[in-house]
């Protein structure tokens, strides 16, 4: 696979990652030797059919799962063999999850939902509140801090989720079918918002099977049977030249 | 850290409020457990303190011998028109008892008591009471004190003086307005006694023949014998009964409670059925009663602890059940929190705190109810209850502990879920 030649730092790197599951007698090879680099400022889409290994890749990228073989470096640190607690902290500090079904906590208000990631880093206080307010207005929900998720539309909920993903200043945003539950107008709004964030320097990785989502990314990584089938450069003249 | 904890507690409350009915039903298990423990302890403590007080009033270094009417003759006397009954401790026996006791414990005090039931009159005031004939050392033995005037003296005894000392309540009944000192009261229909002293108010101390000591009249033993004699004529329903009782009670006071056991067994030998087939003397050893009461209190506390453990165990199982249901319901929330950086310990503390809040709420309401029940019992059944702060703390502490202990397993299960699986949960 081609190595990017620019000098942007590598944020996440898969080095020949395998992930095998034991299902009764059979071994399922969900990932079978995947290598990938995500650089700071990248916008990468991961695509593939069901069973191609997309979800497994997402879980490992998000430190929710570990490779069976190979290694995963996140922010220059090998997290492959990290114990559970350290991995949880890494997750909380470096990754901003955006889920298909928003995954806000229903009994908490918007403000409280936004503060959850900082709570687990003992960073709750006046600053966390100020930050939550700032990010809520950034995603256009400044007046809804005291609402419960159920009182918001799907698009608004996803905006809250995006704001929550930004609360910990993550290394990258990791979106899992972020627009899968939204109508096409709202989908466009959310994708536009992500474009804006990317414009502000945020690194984004999206996992999707929706071409409309993937075409916003710089490049699309196609998975098939647990391996990288091809990498498509979505921009004919990318900022970083490829050899 | 404090802020974090209060945030976790608030979060717990919020989650519990999502299922108000379920939470309150679970809480009820703990609530009634705590309330019943506090109430039972209060009733038990009240009863036992009352008993202990009564036995202490009798004197823990005392041994009491009392004449009792033999039970088997009671019926036959009622049938014939005229009967004669003689029972109880005689003067001779009292001498023997005194010699026996003083042989063993030279410092012992022995006091004899005669009781005569009579009406006592002072101008228009009248009261039926017991006239106690006794000796100067009565006060030492019973630990009573004179509030005003003096007590019976040896001179009163030899002169068979018609003087009396009044119990505090009786003095107030007979002399509501005037000072009773040096006034005379009429006992029965012909015997006048000059009041030389008034006793301190005793309160609850039980006295002879169903009265309290505060209502009795005390006169010299010698005067009692001379004025009232040893025989009493009791007329009831056309039948006339003569009863001869020389002494109603002999009270023995020892210097030390360690001497009580020896003297008591000596005296028991003396009044054994072989010696006194009538069975007309009873021995009371307050120290033994006190020990029995303490022993039965200990037993009561053990039984109570078992009942309390069972009821709190049941409450705890309820909490565990609900917490397991909660964990399953909120699997997705657990997954979200894990994805957002929660470590296992965060998940554990979240659910532990929730379980503890649940049972502590039950504990708080249970304490309130547990304080109310003894109050109601006291008002309605006139039964003394004593709520010790320690018992309240104990009941509440156990309830909170139950929440934590029974919350451990559900919390552990929540923390050990695979985050990927948890996030996928619908």
Image (tube, coloured by chain):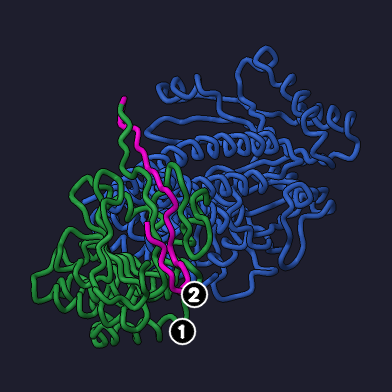
Residue A159: numbered disc: none
CA neighbours of label 2 inside 10 A, class few (<14), some (14 to 19), many (20+): some
Q: Which residue is mark 2?
A: A123
Secondary structure beneath disc 1?
Answer: helix
- Chain B colour? blue
Residue A148 in view here: no
Q: Pick the residue in front: A7 or B104.
A: A7
Label 2, secondary structure: give it: loop
Q: Do the residues at pointers 1 and 2 share their chain?
A: yes
Q: Is label 1 in contact with label 2 (beta carbons under 8 Å)?
A: yes
The N terminus of chain B sits in image quarter:
bottom right
- Residue at the front extreme of this rendering: A243
Observer-nearest residue: B171 or B264? B264
Q: Which residues are magenta?
A: A1-25
Residue nearest the observer in this picture, A101 or A223: A223
Q: Position of residue B231 (x, y in %)?
A: 60, 34
Q: Which mark is residue A127?
A: 1
User: Residue drawn at (88%, 34%), measured in percent from left and top?
Assistant: B105
Indicate left or right for B193 with B325 as reference. Answer: right
């Amino acid at each position: 696979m081609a190595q990017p030649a620019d000098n942007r730092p590598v944020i996440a790197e898969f080095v020949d990652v395998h992930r095998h599951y034991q299902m009764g007698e059979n071994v399922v090879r969900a990932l079978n030797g995947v290598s990938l680099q995500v650089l700071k400022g990248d916008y990468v889409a991961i695509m593939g059919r069901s069973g191609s290994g997309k979800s497994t890749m997402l879980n490992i990228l998000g430190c929710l799962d570990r490779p069976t073989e190979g290694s995963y470096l996140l922010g220059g640190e090998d997290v492959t063999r990290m114990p559970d607690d350290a991995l949880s902290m890494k997750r909380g500090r470096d990754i901003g999850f955006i889920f298909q079904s928003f995954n806000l906590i229903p009994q908490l208000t918007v403000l409280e939902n936004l503060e959850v990631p900082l709570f687990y880093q003992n960073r709750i206080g006046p600053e966390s509140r100020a930050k939550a307010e700032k990010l809520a207005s950034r995603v256009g929900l400044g007046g809804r801090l005291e609402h419960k998720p159920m009182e918001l539309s799907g698009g608004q909920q996803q905006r809250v989720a995006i704001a929550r993903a930004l609360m910990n200043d993550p290394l990258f945003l990791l979106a899992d079918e972020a627009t899968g539950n939204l109508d096409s107008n709202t989908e466009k709004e959310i994708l536009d918002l992500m474009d804006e964030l990317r414009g502000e320097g945020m690194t984004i990785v999206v996992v999707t099977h929706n071409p409309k989502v993937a075409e916003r990314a710089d490049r699309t990584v196609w998975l098939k049977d647990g391996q990288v089938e091809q990498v498509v450069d979505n921009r004919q003249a990318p900022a970083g030249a490829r050899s | 850290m404090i802020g974090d904890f209060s945030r976790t507690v608030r979060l717990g409350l919020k989650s519990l409020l999502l299922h108000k009915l379920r939470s309150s039903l679970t809480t009820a298990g703990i609530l009634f457990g705590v309330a019943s423990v506090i109430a039972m302890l209060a009733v038990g403590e009240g009863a036992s303190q009352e008993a202990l007080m009564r036995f202490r009033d009798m004197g823990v270094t005392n041994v009491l011998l009392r004449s009792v009417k033999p039970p088997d003759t009671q019926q036959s006397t009622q049938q014939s028109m005229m009967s004669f009954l003689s029972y109880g401790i005689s003067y001779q026996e009292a001498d023997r008892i005194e010699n026996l006791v003083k042989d063993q414990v030279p410092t012992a005090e022995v006091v004899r008591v005669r009781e005569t039931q009579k009406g006592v009159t002072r101008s228009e005031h009248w009261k039926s009471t017991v006239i106690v004939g006794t000796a100067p050392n009565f006060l030492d033995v019973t630990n009573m004190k004179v509030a005003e005037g003096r007590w019976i003296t040896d001179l009163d005894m030899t002169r068979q003086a018609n003087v009396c000392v009044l119990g505090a309540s009786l003095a107030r009944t007979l002399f509501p307005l005037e000072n009773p000192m040096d006034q005379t009261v009429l006992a029965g229909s012909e015997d006048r006694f000059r009041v030389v002293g008034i006793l301190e108010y005793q309160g609850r101390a039980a006295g002879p023949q169903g009265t309290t000591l505060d209502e009795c009249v005390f006169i010299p033993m010698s005067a009692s014998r001379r004025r009232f004699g040893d025989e009493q004529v009791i007329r009831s329903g056309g039948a006339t009964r003569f009863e001869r009782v020389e002494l109603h009670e002999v009270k023995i006071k020892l210097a030390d409670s360690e001497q009580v056991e020896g003297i008591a067994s000596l005296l028991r030998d003396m009044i054994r059925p072989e010696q006194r087939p009538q069975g007309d003397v009873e021995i009371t050893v307050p120290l033994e009663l006190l020990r029995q009461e303490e022993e039965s209190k200990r037993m009561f506390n053990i039984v109570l602890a078992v009942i309390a453990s069972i009821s709190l165990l049941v409450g705890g199982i309820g909490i565990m059940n609900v917490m397991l249901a909660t964990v399953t319901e909120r699997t997705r929330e657990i997954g979200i929190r894990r994805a957002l950086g929660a470590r296992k310990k965060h998940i554990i503390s979240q659910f532990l705190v929730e379980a503890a809040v649940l049972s502590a709420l039950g504990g708080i309401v249970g304490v309130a109810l547990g304080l109310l029940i003894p109050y109601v019992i006291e008002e309605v059944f006139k039964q003394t209850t004593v709520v010790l702060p320690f018992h309240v703390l104990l009941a509440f502490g156990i309830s909170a502990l139950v929440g934590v202990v029974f919350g451990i397993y559900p919390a552990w299960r929540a923390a050990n879920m695979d985050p990927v699986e948890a996030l996928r949960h619908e």
